[in-house]
Amino acid sequence: MTDDELIWRIAGGSGDGIASTSQNFAKALMRSGRHVFTHRHYPSRIRGGHTYTEVRVSETPVRARGDGFNFLLALGDSFARNPSENAYYGNEELKPLEENLDELREGGVIVYDTGLLDASEIDDFEERAEENDWHVYPMDLRNMARDFGREVMRNTAGVGVTAALTGMDLNHIEDLMGEAMPDEILEPNVEILHHAYERAQEEFDHTHDVAVPGGEHDEEQALLSGSDAIAYGALDAGCRFIAGYPMTPWTEVFTIMSQNLPEVGGISEQVEDEIAAAALAIGASHAGVKSMSGSSGGGFALMSEPLGLAEMSETPVVLVEAMRAGPSTGLPTKPEQADLEHVLYTSQGDSTRVVLAPGTPEEAYDQTRQAFRLAYEYQLPAIVLYDQKLGGEMTNVPASHFDREPNPDPGSVITEAELEDAPHDATGKYQRFQYDAEKGVTPRSLPGQKDGRFLVTGNEHHQSGHIDEDPENRVLQMDRRLGKFDHISADLEEEDNQTYFGPEDAEYGMITFGSQQGTVKEAVDRLNDDGHSVRAVSISDMAPFPTAELAEFLDGVEEAVVVEMNASGQLRGLAQKELGRYGEKMSSLLKYDGEPFRPDEVVEGFKASIDGEDLPGQNTKYVPAAGD
Amino acid sequence: MSAFSAIGERGEVEREEFTPGMEPQPTWCPGCGDFGVLKALKQAMPEVGRSPDEVLLCTGIGCSGKLNSYFESYGFHTIHGRSLPIARAAKLANPGLEVVAAGGDGDGYGIGGNHFVHTARENHDMTYIVFNNEIFGLTKGQTSPTSPKGHKSKTQPHGSAKSPIQPLSLSLTSGASYVARTAAVNPNQAKEIIVEAMEHDGFAHIDFLTQCPTWNKDARQYVPYIDVNESDDYDFDTTDRSEASEMMQKTEEALYEGEVLTGRFYVDSDRPSYGQEKRAIGEMPEEPLAERYFDEEYDWERSHDLFLDKHK
Ligand SMILES: Cc1ncc(C[n+]2csc(CCOP(=O)(O)OP(=O)(O)O)c2C)c(N)n1
Ligand code: SF4
Ligand SMILES: [Mg+2]
């Protein structure tokens, strides 16, 4: 494979500063005009345990991890618990080098820190390197860092070596270090960066063919993650209250909001549990503030009952659900898309919630804003469903995408002036839940408004809010609440949230959602370049579901593979339930080993679906269509 | 100009204003202590001087949770155990509101116990009334967290093996800054305590003994009661934590020996409320957040202007 891209993997121990180093590396390359995409892998531990981040660098836009990588910077795990081969978790000290070799491409580069890693302890290292034409550049980064004063600086030294070997300028890296580091740390870091760069230039005979590609942006870019985009979408939607309880990976959105809300005069509350978190968001919203909460699988399960209360009491609220691999505590730091059904169906009774599942940072920003708009206009909960992958991966997005007017509109709310002419009951209670309200929504009054009082309850209630078990009232109120969905469907059609790739008249289809969008897009491009005829749709509207739109898509293709990161084919199940047919047209490509799909796995999966061949990869699974 | 003009507008209100027209007749059983809470609350309102439109009464689920069906104000009948987190957030969102939460002993000390501990700890400026009938009323008489040890019910046929929770002591150690116990059979004291609790700036917890003649037939009617602040038999300082703690323990034990002690047990008027603490560290705006959405002059911040630079 000719490498017109650089996929740089920096590997070390949890706690070794891999994340911040890779972020600076990506940003430096973005600043110099390249497109970047990061992919991270880390264990559920604070110290120790092998972790890596990949930075994929390309001349053209990239929105997926690659198939493997071509440059390894193995720093060694300075926190390794157990340097013995017989240990349950294996020899951890060696892992940053050893465990990454399988995915390193032919012709790839290896830079490793001889201060911590001894390649001769790895079985057949030399032979494998020769066989795969790997170009190995060992350097004692740890001792170099010690000489310059601080051992953590081996990361900076590693970046210096990388730059020398890939033809990258140091100026952007230096700028970024200058922006983040206080003077006394900056100086030795700049020194070691240059020192390592020069040594790599002088000491090594550069035999490899991996380099930073060219590139130029035509507009200013920002490097951000799905979590950033969700938080900014919320802030720009006028959200000024968040309540939460930490849980990976939702903690990222919670943290960003908690850091930014005080700056805009908002309130963030870390509370006793997720039941409280959702309840607080409901309470603040009831009092008139645009509010949100969120969690990941287990924490979201605790929100189930408040979620139903928001539906029944018609209190607007936005919840975000950051999926990680389940069930139960599952793989806490690994991505999966197995909470789709959980989010759609949890809580008792017939539900009235909006669920949007963005697939890119841009969509995350846009759809979070939509979630607020729909929640507050239609007085119901709206959920933004995403996963650990979309939340944490960083990519460059045109800064102009965020250059939009804020929307602090509190939605369907009545003013005191309007209350004067609004219908009230005998003692002056406002008729908060009128049967014949336009689009099913009576503008809500807010506590403290003159003559706006009403009772709201999770029990079935009368127009005035009072508990009412009369069958006729029950049906009227249920129909009214559920009827909002028709209006929301029409409203969402305008938003055009589904994203399509590939030729319109393609023979075959692919369906996916959320964080797999970029990977599927890349696979579709490759397949079409290879002479196949494939079109893909990435679905965001999970509730209400774009039934007619998907039916049209399916009518246009012979067969479609549904690509999702779970074991039971939840999106395919949802599509079949909503469409009521096409069971014979949809097959599944599934992955649930804790790692997202690689583009080549999707390509192979597609081929398996059309010619019935077995999948080469161990960890993906193909499930044929019904009746096949 | 405020979008919530009811707040602070009147000062003078009549007791009758708090009786709704829709459902003026509570459906509680005859002789139920819950009537006593409703009555005391209505009586307190003219003294507190807040109108129905500036009160938000959040309740849990239980016989007690029906309180806001029979009390005219903004009302939120929430879910079992969750009145506190909803109520306290409403207070943060619009601090001008008079926020009251209420519910049963099962609701507040059992299923919602975590929220009780944390809301007290944070000292939110609100009043919390727990209808303590030592039983699950609405679900027909099961043992509750305050039922005495040995209490028999359909779900504990051999008598409860558990010692009851000590609500006053729990409240104090959790951090409540006003802790009182009153009883439905003592309407004057109950009214006075409710007035004090609503005027108190901080978390005011009232453990309200409410007899349940339907399911707790053996239980006392909470008579005769003794007001510990007035009785010569008791001498303690309600502003002193350790004296209050000792008195609470005595009171909690005495209840199960047939002696009903009521009154104010702990009052700390100096401790800042949660809202004050949060403002002091710059994490809560001075102006009520809820007002901002009606302020046409307000220049809403944009993430593009404030936060995007660090991503470039
Ligand atoms: C999550 C949940 N669990 C159980 C119930 C059923 N339930 C309703 S009220 C109640 C207990 C009522 O006891 P208490 O809180 O003491 O109120 P009381 O009726 O005595 O006033 C229970 C268990 C419920 N509504 N929700
Ligand atoms: S069951 Fe008990 S608590 Fe409930 S209304 Fe009847 S007497 Fe009151
Ligand atoms: Mg009870």
Image (spheres, coloured by chain):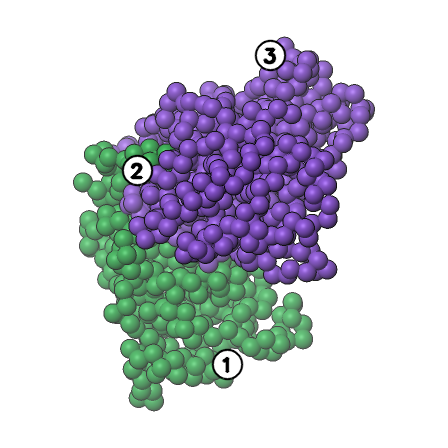
Q: Position of residue A40 (x, y in %)?
A: 55, 42
Colour in which chain A is drawn: purple
Seen from the viewer's position, the closer of residues A373 and B303 is B303
Q: Which residue is mark 1?
A: B256
| Secondary element at tag 1 | loop
Reading the image, the residue beneath label 2 is B306
Q: Is mark 2 within 8 Å of ligand 1?
A: no
Mark in the foreground, 2 or 1? 2
Mark-to-mark CA distance, 2 and 1: 60 Å
Q: Are marks 2 and 1 in contact (CB under 8 Å)?
A: no
Quadrant into which the C terminus of chain A falls? top right
**Which numbered mark, 3 or 2, is in the foreground of this view?**
2
User: Mark 1: which amino acid?
Assistant: Tyr
Looking at the picture, how far across and down is residue A253, in whole percent?
45, 44
Q: Quadrant of residue A607?
A: top right
Q: Position of residue A346 (x, y in %)?
A: 59, 43
Q: Nearer the viewer, mark 3 or mark 1?
A: 3
Q: Which chain is green?
A: B
Identify residue for label 3: A504
> Quick one: label 2, few (<14), some, or many (20+) residues within 10 Å?
few
The kind of residue on which mark 2 rests is: Leu
Compare marks 2 and 1 and give the one earlier in the sequence: 1
- Report the side of A365 relative to A554 (left or right): left
Locate residue A596 relative to residue B30 in the image: left or right. right
Q: Is residue A520 above or below residue A122?
A: above
A445 with respect to A545 (left or right): left
